[in-house]
Image (spheres, rainbow, N blue to C red):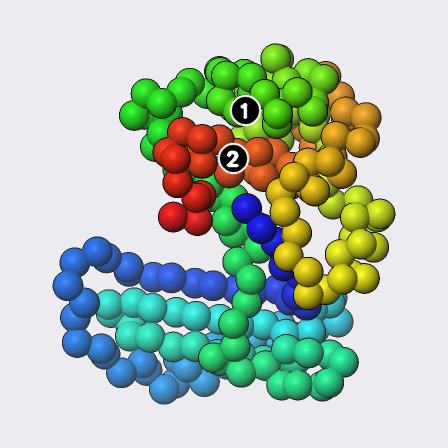
Amino acid sequence: MKFKTSSYLIILIVVLGLTVCKAPTEKPFDTQLADKLQTALQEAEENPDTKFPGVLLYISSSKLGTWVGAAGLSNIKTDTTMRPDDKFRAGSIMKPFISVVILQLMEEGRFSLEDPMTAVLPESVSSRFSDSEQITVRMLLNHTSGIPDWITGAMIGKITANPQRIWEVDEYLDAAAAQEPYFPPGEGWRYSNTDYSLLGMVIERATGRSWRE
């Protein structure tokens, strides 16, 4: 699992009516609706309360057709206008995908949601965290593990100082393990990217494939 930094932009992705059957003939998107959506995007981007520089909206529907709109800037330093064909990092939208794969593997009998980290991860990983024998897969899924987030001030400083570097998951785990647990396993809730970094490793160990696959 690797991570490469990029500009922080909020991405809005709306997918309607997706199917796995043969794709129908593309239907022209209603121009009046497109105009309304573009106006809404522009107003959202210009709203001082939203505090984001750029926005991209993608709609795909068997009834409506496909439309992509953009507003604002893709790069505030160069004052570059956002374009409908700009690319973005998936960001935390990957967490629901990882959750689904974990549940699929659980249904296949690969492991239980109540299995501890020590049962689903290599010792070289689980041994970094003092409470790994009490932290279950379920706790990782719902952010009740108590494992600290690897996104810390120090780590962010390192990342921003090396924006083109590709970081390894072991480096994230080291940053998390260097901190004190937020709370004992299962006795609180706190968002932690480390939980899902670990779940990605659970997927890799259970399937023998990269979690990206």
Does residue 204 appear left or right of residue 194 in this picture?
left
Nearer to me, 151 or 139: 151
**Residue 20 at x, y percent in the picture:** 21, 56
Does residue 161 appear left or right of residue 185 in this picture?
right
Nearer to me, 212 or 186: 212
The residue depicted at 57 percent of the width and 33 percent of the height is 198
The residue depicted at 57 percent of the width and 28 percent of the height is 140
Q: Marks 1 and 2: in contact by CB < 8 Å? A: yes
**Residue 181 at x, y percent in the picture:** 77, 24
Q: Which numbered marker is on residue 122?
A: 1
**Residue 116 at x, y percent in the picture:** 54, 16
Nearer to me, 91 or 25: 91
Does residue 50 appear left or right of residue 161 in this picture?
left
Looking at the picture, which amino acid does disc 1 mark?
Pro
Which residue, as the protein is rendered here, is positioned at the far front? 124
**Residue 124 at x, y percent in the picture:** 62, 25
Mark 2 Cα-neighbour bin, 10 Å: few <14, some 14–19, many ≥20: many
The residue depicted at 61 percent of the width and 54 percent of the height is 3
Q: Quadrant of residue 63?
A: bottom left
Task: Give the vertical position of 182 relative to 84 (above or below).
Answer: above
Q: If you read the primary sequence from the N terminus, does the residue marked by circle 2 or circle 1 appear first?
A: 1
| SS at mark 2 in the image | helix
Rounded to the nearest whole Å, what is the CA distance between mark 2 and mark 1? 9 Å
Does residue 213 appear left or right of residue 36 in this picture?
left
Task: Give the vertical position of 1 relative to 118 (above or below).
Answer: below
Looking at the picture, which amino acid does disc 2 mark?
Met
| SS at mark 1 in the image | loop
Residue linked to disc 2 = 201
